[in-house]
Image: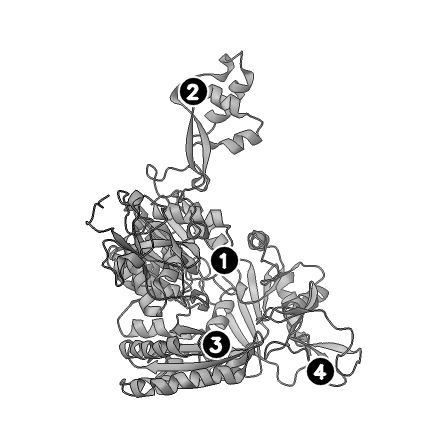
Amino acid sequence: MHSLFDDEPPVIRVALPVPLTRCFDYILPPNLQNAYLPLGARVRVPYRNKTLVGVVMARQVSPDIPLEKLKPLTEVIDDASLLDDHQLALAKWLARYCHGPVGEVISMMLPAPLRQGAAAHIQEETYWMATQSGRALEPEKMHRAPKQAELLRALQKHQQPVAATMLRSLGFTSTQMAALEDKGLAERYLQSRHLEGRDHETRSVLAEIPLQLNDDQKHVVSEVTGQLGQPEVFLLEGVTGSGKTEVYLQVIEAVLKQGRQVLVLVPEIGLAPQTVNRFKKRFSVPVMTLHSGLNDKERLDAWLLARDGRAGVLIGTRSAAVTPFKDLGLIVVDEEHDASYKQGDGIRYSARDLAIVRGKMLSCPVVLGSATPSLETLHNATEKRFQWLKLTQRAGSSVQLPDVYLHDIQHKKLTNGIDGGLLQVMRTHLEQGGQVLAFINRRGFAPALMCHDCGWVSDCPFCDARMTLHREPPRLHCHHCDSVSAIPHQCPKCFNSELKPVGSGTERMEETLEQAFKDWPVFRVDRDTVSKKGMMEKLLARVNTEEPCVLVGTQMLAKGHHFPGVSLVVVLDADGGFYSSDFRGLERMGQLLTQVAGRAGRERRKGKVVVQTHRPDDPLLKLLAQHDYSEFSRCLLEERKDTLLPPYSFMAIIRAEANQSDLVSGFLTDVVQAAEPVTSQIQGLEVTGPVPSPMERRFGRYHMQIWLICDRRGPLHQGISCLLELISRHPLQRKVRWSLDVDPQELI
């Protein structure tokens, strides 16, 4: 049989989820040569000794090898494009920038069921609604069918379709529903259960009246809405509590009124519930979520609803940045500075940077919002690459930022990590009806367990780190490699039974505060307490009653939460960033302290922040206490400029690990030396290493790095390509696990 394309069997090019940078060619067998095969559709193909699901990247390909050596395609899964031209172009760009396989990039873009070849169908439920005749009929006249009359009465109470599952929970049967349909009194609909019966195409986009804006907010909304449809990037820098979310909502309203869609990125799952609730209250269009807390079917539904244009707003974490949309009109990246936007394994992309690239591809604006913008973003705004918009005052009734006090704890005796004098300050706020937030960025009961006699410490057997002591449930837990062991009853070294916890974590602080404040509830917020689905929502509901309570937790409490009742924030350890081995340590410390301090005094109560520190005279810490993040960041940018570190240069790290130190060191040394004749000729490129990672031994393996730094992106990527080419040919490359991180956000 002749093909539609040529006299020879047509050849297609397929991207497969394998760690090879090229795509693969396959012949269309005779039984599929008349099938419509669009780009972006999924197919099943043989690969080595198994069958894989891939995506069609090109048709009518001229293969590099003889046709007789090509294998035939097995099955066409989709009869339409699953990924449109924009998604394919985005995948190709990301693969080039990260120097990764395009097949793995595309696989990352797809929900798990689609990667496995499942049908691209939304879970649909049956909904019922009274017809016009059904609404006109009085149920009392249905004497012979009292249950049907009762069902009709229930349907008449609703202006929107009612889910069959809800009707069954009220005691009605499918037979009764079908009987009303036969009589022309009710009609059924099939639609996604996530759309909650709403038809956003025929309704106003607003479900409630927007809040009144101040002059700064009005200016920001006007600037952004005036450039809808343009590939502009806006930095929205607003002090904590300045009403950035209300600005987002009113800009989004303008986009939805144009019939277009909006993507809102948030850094953590914990922020999604309160953000979604506020968005759902404001808009009548379907507001969907996409994050790792959903199951596979829920993620697939959200992905398909966004792709098909039925989701007006999609709120998601990092992975939502690659979700397809039918007509994307705006991207919002909230808390744009957050390191959670950087993928830590596989294709190491930045969701924030990807959003910017995507906005330019689609000619839609991108809004980067933060009270503490990253130094890279501030540098781009200073260089006029981004439009810089500012909110300088708090919105609503709370117009003042909280007072910040640097509390010197040098030479003071601490009770489980807190100065006893601060407990009385906390009690005063609770007695006055306020809420107190105690911030300590360490999980567990204590950072380590130590023998009082010989000094033995609970070191991790697999990492250059100590195992954290947990009480709920009792265990020693390494937060780096996730290894767990039982708490010893005696010292493994000297057999003494007097083992003591060293330092404090959230569990120990919770216990201390429960003992100090028996009349008020204490809520702990960390990954151990809110890991279960719905736990964060329940806790936020309790706190938002504004009844006096104490919150103790990690940075999960610092990111964007609105706690109207919190009048006092106590930061128990502000000094960690000063001793970080990462050049971003001071930046992260400043952002975290500013963010957590911003939880205080957001509504009617005057806010107060007390920061425990051994360095009260440090000029950078004083700037943060004065709410001068702008000057703080300017000082850090000057330091980065002097040392030619990002954002005044571009950086990549090649990381390698092996179970023997000599193996990984020899591997990277060979690569650097072999590349030197080429890399030394690349102007501006510096290659440093191999050097041990800040934590050299993790997971029982030894980790080392090569740093590449250059003042321009082009030469940097040229150097990366050279090194990767040598790595691919090195005889040890299968014995050493290695990875590339372009624009790294952490050094470990």
Front residue (pair 43, 230): 43
Name which residue lies at 54% across and 84% down: 615
Decide: marks 2, 4 in contact (CB < 8 A)?
Answer: no
Looking at the image, is mark 1 or mark 3 earlier in the sequence?
1
Residue 456 badge: 4
Residue mark closest to the camera, 4 vs 3: 3
Vertical relation: 475 (above or below) 731: above
- The amino acid type of the residue labelled 3 equals Val
Looking at the image, is mark 1 or mark 4 earlier in the sequence?
1
Residue 667 spot, x, y in % from top left: 45, 82
Per the image, label 1 sits on a secondary structure element best described as helix
- The residue carrying pointer 2 sits among few (fewer than 14), some (14 to 19) or many (20 or more) residues within 10 Å by Cα, namely many
Residue mark closest to the camera, 2 vs 3: 3
Vertical relation: 73 (above or below) 395: above
- The residue carrying pointer 4 sits among few (fewer than 14), some (14 to 19) or many (20 or more) residues within 10 Å by Cα, namely some
Horizontally, is 426 left or right of 283 in the view?
A: right
Residue 736 badge: 3
Write down the residue under mark 1.
Answer: 269
Looking at the image, is mark 2 or mark 4 earlier in the sequence?
2
- The amino acid type of the residue labelled 2 equals Gly
Residue 210 spot, x, y in % from top left: 38, 48
User: From this viewpoint, is residue 365 visible?
Assistant: no
Vertical relation: 582 (above or below) 127: below
Residue 134 badge: 2
